[in-house]
Image (cartoon, helix red, strand yellow):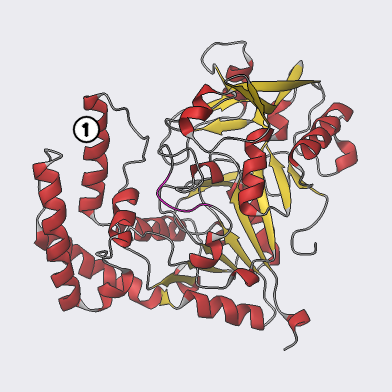
Amino acid sequence: MTQQNRGRNVVVIGTQWGDEGKGKVVDWLTDHAAGVVRFQGGHNAGHTLVIKGKKTALQLIPSGVMRDGVACYIGNGVVVDPTHLLGEIERLEAAGVEVRSRLFISESCPLILPFHVEVDRAREALRESSGAGKIGTTGKGIGPAYEDKVARRALRVQDLKHPDRFAKKLRELLEFHNFVLQGYLKGTPLEFQPIFDHAMKVAEQLRPMLADVGVRIEQTNREGGNVLFEGAQGTLLDVDHGTYPFVTSSNCVAGNAAAGSGVGPDKLHYILGITKAYTTRVGSGPFPTELDIHQPGTVGHHLSTVGQERGTVTGRARRCGWLDAAALKRSILINGVSGLCITKLDVLDGLEEIKVCVGYELDGQRLDILPLDADEIEACKPVYETFPGWKESTAGLTQWDQLPVNARKYLERVQECIGAPIDMVSTGPDREHTILLRHPYKA
């Protein structure tokens, strides 16, 4: 097969602190894909899809599952809680979605086990009681599971195929985590047998879905099929490039789509950055453009309530603020963004004026890109440009020319500030509420 006949691959990543609306965009793009891949994170991610008015919340399974016949891959970069995964499969099946025949899980995925969850929660409690302040984890064991991976002691999905090997490694790993739980975190130790018995039970259900994900993606491309790589969280939560230590435990950036799924970086043809028309953040950490969300009548309260800004996984109210173009510049640099999709534009409808942060003042100096040090970011004072708002509704529009003039001017100025094109605009939660300017699979 010639290179021209090969499938094309698109990576979808969040350019802010997560919750940008990636799930809806992935679902929309999946109409042009033969497969969708999750390549990092775990069930701390949350994607809410609205299809014909019906909401579906996904955490671990790729958003492409809502399209019939599309293969769904969980790559080696994902940490997997097998109990949660099976529960999510069962919920989708109860809603009439076929999952097991088209879900493929990398054997190299590290497992999240009950002691990871206990350690995660106990550490957050200890930080809070000591006055150190919470990181803001979801308490689902994601961080401790990644720690075991990096320390080369993790139990992986492939170990479930070998009961004796699994038992040996589990005893060693449990001994280590119980030591930490009891001796440092003042928690309660866990017992071996219940964990082992449950793992063997779920192993029987997972076995038919195990696969060599990288080989399957390559085969799909060779046969002319497109593949979509679905990022979780957002660039500014990346463990290397985010507002450390207030970050997640994995690499959320586009480059990790290759490492986290088992294909080469030359297979990543287009990088679509998802950007909310304003900015939100869940949990602790610096947020230069943050507004007060609690005072009725304020812009922050408007963004929070009209945008229904609560975490899909945690239910926590998201912090809200103006769009930060200087932070976006950092994300575009890190990810090599080909084009942006602006989401939730309709939430800005009705505001008298709209602001965009175009830089910061820090210690008497002007910066036009987000600093790398979280303490410096905390000290940054945003520099804003102000634009007139619009009264007309943008909800559900599907053509650029239908947008109010001021909305178009706002988006055009954002493009100038960040140096990347806006290729899509989302004007509502349903998959049909989308303005397409340049198609990622045809660019």
Q: Which residues are magenta?
A: 248-252
Q: Is residue 81 magenta?
A: no
Q: In the image, 8: left or right of 413?
A: left
Q: Quadrant of residue 69?
A: bottom right
Relative height, residue 89 to residue 426 (above, below): below
Measuring 22% from the left and 79% from the top, which residue is drawn there?
Answer: 162
Relative height, residue 306 to residue 256 (above, below): above
Residue annotated with mark 1: 126
Depth check: 380 or 275 in front? 380
Report how many numbered discs are placed on residues in the image: 1
Measuring 81% from the left and 33% from the top, which residue is drawn there?
Answer: 413
Depth check: 124 or 382 in front? 382
- Please provide percent x and percent y for residue 372: 53, 38
- Please provide percent x and percent y for residue 120: 27, 44
Depth check: 246 or 391 in front? 246
Amino acid type at image mark 1:
Leu
Relative height, residue 42 to residue 164 (above, below): above
